[in-house]
Amino acid sequence: MKNIILFLLLGTLITLILIFGCSALCVAVIIVLAKFINAEILKALPFSVIVGMVLSFFFYGKIMKKIMNKFGVMHPHNK
């Protein structure tokens, strides 16, 4: 039970860090593009946060798949 709670807390923390990091990266890209190309690009700023969230879930899935494979979680022979 203790391991499950730890796994859930760690997974939540990783998700929040990924959401923040990916969203910040997307916002930074939009700001740089607005600075060098056209200030009208700033209208896409709210969408960059959404794209950051989608990217974070993609990366979270990849990270969890590697962790599950490393520790043998969800393999049929471990049931």
Image (cartoon, grey):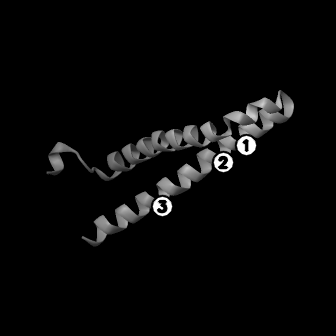
Circles 1 and 2, Cβ within 8 Å, touching? The answer is: yes
Front disc: 3 or 1? 1
Would residue 35 be found to the left or right of residue 46 on screen? right
Would residue 50 be found to the left or right of residue 32 on screen? left
> Residue 43's x, y, as percent?
71, 34
Check the picture and name the quadrant holding the N terminus.
Answer: bottom left
Helix, strand or loop at label 1? It is helix
Helix, strand or loop at label 2? It is helix
Q: Give the quarter of the image for residue 17.
A: bottom right
Q: Residue furthest bottom?
A: 2
> Residue 2's x, y, as percent?
29, 72
Residue at (85%, 35%) from the top-left corner? 35
Q: Which residue is mark 2?
A: 24
Give the residue type that dot 1 points to: Ala
Helix, strand or loop at label 3? It is helix
Q: Which residue is mark 3?
A: 13
